Image (cartoon, grey):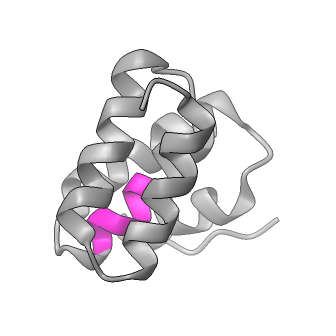
Amino acid sequence: PENLDAVYHLAIVENGLGKFEHAKDLYEKILILNPNHAQSHHNLATLLLQMKQPELALMHYEKAVQLQPDNTTAKHMIAALKGQTLTE
């Protein structure tokens, strides 16, 4: 599918169905077409954590925060992955 919104929603559905590899592929496709899609970075990071890939997850959480500085969930996940406590 060429419609990024449709691909994004399909990735969410696939993730929910436990089809992690397909969901990962879909998020990566979105990010190839639109590297600044903050929510895809966030969702891919969360998925990568489920797939036991914390280093890659951290990279995508950091990109999500760079694109969307008010993303407090991603900030907390970055802190957790780095073994820090985030206070606001």
Q: Quadrant of residue 20?
A: bottom left
Q: Look at 62% across and 38% down and name the residue there.
A: 5
Q: What residue is rendered at 48% in x and 35% in y?
A: 63
Q: Is residue 68 left or right of residue 83?
A: right
Instruction: Please report the bounds of the magenta region as a residue range.
Output: 43-49
Quarter-of-image position of residue 68: top right
**Residue 88 at least partly seen:** yes
Task: Name the side, left or right, on which 72 lies relative to 50.
Answer: right
**Residue 43 in sight in this render:** no
- Magenta segment: does it hold 81? no
Of the pair 2 and 42, the residue shown nearer to us: 2
- In the rendered image, residue 45 lying in the magenta stretch gets the answer yes
Is residue 70 shown above or below 3?
Answer: below
Percent across and percent down for residue 78 are 47, 59
Residue at 17% across, 75% down: 52
Query: What is the quadrant of the C terminus in the image?
Result: bottom right
The extreme bottom residue here reads: 17
User: What residue lies at 42% left-to-right and 32% top-to-bottom?
Assistant: 1
List x then y, in percent, for residue 86.
64, 69
